[in-house]
Amino acid sequence: MANNKNTRTDLVLEANELFKQQAMKERLERSGEPEGVEVENAGTNDIRITRVRVTSQAGEQSIGKPMGNYVTLEIPGLRENNQQLFEDTCKETAKEIERLISLGEKDTVLIVGLGNWNVTPDALGPKVVSSVMVTRHLLEYVPDQVDEGVRPVCAISPGVLGITGIETGEIIKGIVDRVSPELIIAIDALASRKMERVNTTIQIADTGIAPGSGVGNKRMELSEKTMGVPVIAIGVPTVVDAATMANDTIDLMLDSMIKQASQGTEFYSMLNDIDKNEKYQLIQEILNPYIGNLIVTPKEIDDIIERISKIIANGLNIALHKGITLQDVNRYVH
């Protein structure tokens, strides 16, 4: 079964959900996950963790994502300024990153902040880079002033093609050839197909990343195949397209009508039962002549990006440096 390539999403969790919806529509006699896809659930109500492993080409074809490991952290309260949840999310992010990496004590890590720092919803990567512990130069020039357990980490925000005139992948490949890191960690803003996951979800994958693919602007992929070293990708959905927003709004409105209506609920239920992908395609066709492929982000995006970038940066700092805690981070981050 082919996956729905017209729906804008970078999240494997959503790609798997799309497959299940399509399977139900076609009345396939199957249960559980698609062939070649393994799913494990963990975490708490505050921080839900879903680990998806694509193990075969059949799994790749089912959900349209390459073989590898994908971890999704869903934190519904992430938009709120809750300090305890902030700290807990930093620690859980660090644990999930550690699960996907395998490094020696002296191995060098290159952190890449993808995106356009001039556009807030796309500035996640550069914001993370500004808060990570950059230590490669310290270990080279003043090693006696660096705590034991701190590994060499370097970072770059290469900008976007429209600013530099150079493919981001070409810039990173040049740095990799010069610096020779054992691991690349790339951070980028993603696109979601559900409003509820915007700015509340963190995805970590060991398959690399194709910048811009979720909004139809796919660039040169960053992966072990193109870079020559393993690539971990970390992303947060910061936008949805207008059709997704309209689709979700209609569903919420119908749910409300069904609850409140004393009669006529059968009509509302019939509308609510229409296949979600069909509704999405219809809305997209209606909106496209008027607004094109409009991408939408919440108005409080500035504060949210600041908070989430710190979470990811702290998670990286804890995961990459042995013995480092949240309290230690400020000593190295300026």
Image (cartoon, rainbow, N blue to C red):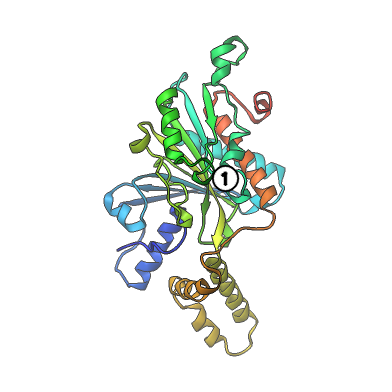
Residue 267, percent from left and from top: 53, 87
Q: Relative to 60, is 245 above or below? A: below
Residue 140, percent from left and from top: 54, 14
- In this rendering, position of residue 108 left or right of residue 35: right
Q: Residue furthest top?
A: 144
Residue 192, percent from left and from top: 51, 57
Q: Residue furthest bottom?
A: 263
Q: Which quadrant of the structure image shows residue 307?
A: top right
Q: Residue at x 43, y 46 (%)?
A: 70
Q: Residue at x 53, y 66 (%)?
A: 244
Q: Residue furthest front?
A: 165
Helix, strand or loop for disc 1: loop
- In this rendering, position of residue 198 left or right of residue 274: right
Q: Residue at x 59, y 71 (%)?
A: 249
Per the image, the residue denoted by label 1 is 116
Residue 218, percent from left and from top: 43, 51
Q: Residue at x 64, y 46 (%)?
A: 305
The amino acid at mark 1 is Asn
Q: Is residue 180 visible?
A: no
Quarter placement of the N terminus: bottom left
- In this rendering, position of residue 77 left or right of residue 137: right
